[in-house]
Image: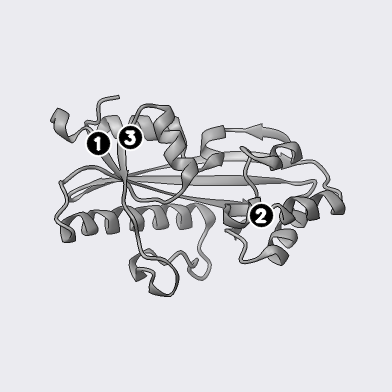
Amino acid sequence: MDPLQSRIYLASQSPRRRELLTQIGVRFEALSFRSGARADPEIDEAPLPGEAPDVYALRVASAKARHGVKLVTLRRLPARIVLAADTTLDLAGEIIGKPRDEAEAVSILQRLSGRSHRVLTAIAVAHQARLETRLSISTVRFRDLEPAELRRYVASGEPLDKAGAYGIQGRAAMFIAEICGSPSGIMGLPLCETALLLRDFGYPL
């Protein structure tokens, strides 16, 4: 890769993904999408009927990467690698995304209490017509949560922008009894898979 192009586009507004990329020395620029009522239809995150959690995560990450490449062209930006990701929880085959409000966050955490679930983070890297994906799968087991501590956690506001209504890098770390898999994948960007995939595209790591 040309040294002048040794920077990628990150198709995500997640501060955690920005921190993780910075941790491994990847230089990037954030590529913003529209959100809310004006959200781009190409990156609709609503699950399809009967869609399996792993299929869902890969589909959404791929859609974000493809749309990122499209925006680079439309905005006449320098052609560079686009990295996108999607994190979801798999609770007994059910897709668990971000809570819509505090009440849903409480409901989700009550269901996770004392149980194991899978955290799926799909990454997609695209450049021009090429697209490659990887999927990181980790298992997390929560201890039994007391109602009062659960309510205090939700009142902190921390779970409202996170898949599964928690983040291991925050206060919810005290809920986790066991992890099997990738800590960075659970946070939203599996660094091992990301680094190897970026290398495949010629990024100097």
Identify residue for label 3. 197
Compute the Cα span from label 3 to label 2: 34 Å
The residue sitting at 50% across, 52% down in the picture is: 54
Distance from disc 3 to disc 1, alpha carbons, whole Å, reads: 14 Å
Q: Position of residue 152 (x, y in %)?
A: 79, 52
- Amino acid of disc 3: Leu
Query: 68 above or below 10?
Result: below
* SS at circle 2: loop
- The residue positioned 40% from the left and 34% from the top of the image is 21
What residue is disc 1 on? 7
Q: Is residue 182 visible?
A: no
Residue 195 falls left or right of residue 90? left
Q: Which mark is residue 157?
A: 2
Q: Position of residue 91 (x, y in %)?
A: 65, 53
* Residue 48 position within the rendered picture, expressed as x and y whole percent measured from the top left: 48, 68
51 vs 47, nearest the viewer: 47
Residue that extends furthest to the top in the rendered view of this protein: 205
Label 3 crowd (10 A; few <14 / some 14-19 / many >=20): some
Helix, strand or loop at label 3? It is helix
